[in-house]
Each structure stands twice: as C-alpha cells, then as structure tokens.
Image (tube, rainbow, N blue to C red):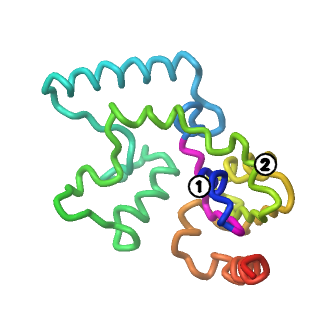
Amino acid sequence: MISAAKIDPRMKAVATVSMYDMGAANRNALNLSQTLEQRKKLIAEAAEQRYAEFTGGETKYTGGTVHKLDENTHPIQREFYEFYRTPRGDYTPKGGSPELTTHPTLSSNTKFMNFYPFNDIETISPRPMLFITGDKAHSKEFSEDAYKRAAEPKELVIVPNAGHVDLYDKTDLIPFDKLEGFFKTNLK
C-alpha cells in the first residue's frame, strides 16, 4: 500500500493494519536480528538455487507457516499457525498444495531484499496516513518505522492486547470506528 501510494496521487488517504515491511524483514529479520554475513549467505544460496532451477533442478521452499506445533515452536510461528493452518485462514488455491501454501521459493524470496517501501514515504504527504498495529504484534516495529519516517498528517494507533494476526479477523479488536472515521474524514 505504501509503495502504491508513493506513485499514485489519486489515493487520497492511506491506512494500514498489521503492516509488514517485507524488504526489511528479509534484509534484517525481526528486530534487526540478522547480520550482514547471514544476509550475504542467504543471497548466495538463492543465487545457486536459481541456477539449479534453471538447469532443471528441484524447486526449494523456505520460511512460511509450520505445519505442526510442538513444544519448541516459536511464538510467532504459533500465531501464524493459529490463522493459516486452521479454519480461520486456511486456504489453498486451486492447483496448489497445502504443503506449499505460505511457503515462498528460496530462489525468489531474496527479491524482497531490494524492496524499500518506506524510502520516500514522506512524499505521500499531505495525504493522511493511518498506521494500526497491536501492542503485542511482532510486526509493530514496521508501523512504528513507517510512522517515524512519514510526514504529516499521520497517526499511529496501537491496539491494546492485540498481536499481529489478531488484527486480521478478531473483530472485537479491530478498530473499525477509527478506520471508518479516518476514511469518512479524508475521502471527501
């Protein structure tokens, strides 16, 4: 949404909920936990995989939502599992496989490393921006970063007791009144 708004002035107002900066997430991981050396290693592995696929090799997948939980499952994976691997959000496209749903290919996922949606975010101004995130959301850092970089008018709403995925479908937590007011005010 941010990238689109930067190049399309017809968008009168921008609101995000549980936003992810997939570029930063792939370059740096959450909370800047990936080192430059780790990033370079991933880039090299993806380059080798692209060549392997070009020459007829098997496609490899990376990341995505786990298919089983155990005592060692990371809390973020548990959160995604509770959405993507249950009736809440489980969906496999026609012709797809439930084993691959949510799993990007190793050869293509590194393309996100060249994705910088928040560069020049200030050019969206004077169109208003609303960033909504949960106070327990592992993705909160992305909304806070976008808010910090954006020019006025802007607003950051932090929903109490909400994680990242909670704001997908838990209607008792989603601030619909805030979104409705924002758009009614700014889409005149």
Q: Amino acid at mark 2?
A: Glu
User: Disc 2 vs disc 1: Cβ atoms closer than 8 Å?
Assistant: no
Q: How many marks?
A: 2
Question: Residue visible at 26% across and 50% down?
Answer: 100
Picture quadrant of residue 126: bottom right
Residue 78 drawn at (x, y percent): 46, 55
The residue pinned by badge 1 equals 4
Between 139 and 57, the one lying in front of the other is 57
The residue pinned by badge 2 equals 122
* Residue 30 appears left or right of 107: right
Per the image, label 1 sits on a secondary structure element best described as helix
Asked if residue 106 is among those painted magenta in the image, a careful observer would answer no
Look at the image and tell me in which quarter the N terminus lies. Answer: bottom right
Question: Residue visible at 55% across and 76% down?
Answer: 170
Q: Residue furthest left?
A: 56
* Residue 46 appears left or right of 181: left
Instruction: Calculate the distance from the C-alpha at mark 2 to the C-alpha at mark 1.
Output: 13 Å
Question: Residue visible at 80% across and 56% down?
Answer: 125
Residue 11 drawn at (x, y percent): 66, 66
Picture quadrant of residue 82: bottom left
The answer to which of marks 2 and 1 sits earlier in the sequence is 1
Question: Residue visible at 54% across and 44% down?
Answer: 22
Q: Which mark is residue 118?
A: none
Residue 101 drawn at (x, y percent): 30, 54
Look at the image and tell me in which quarter the C terminus lies. Answer: bottom right
Asked if residue 15 is among those painted magenta in the image, a careful observer would answer yes
Residue 4 drawn at (x, y percent): 59, 55
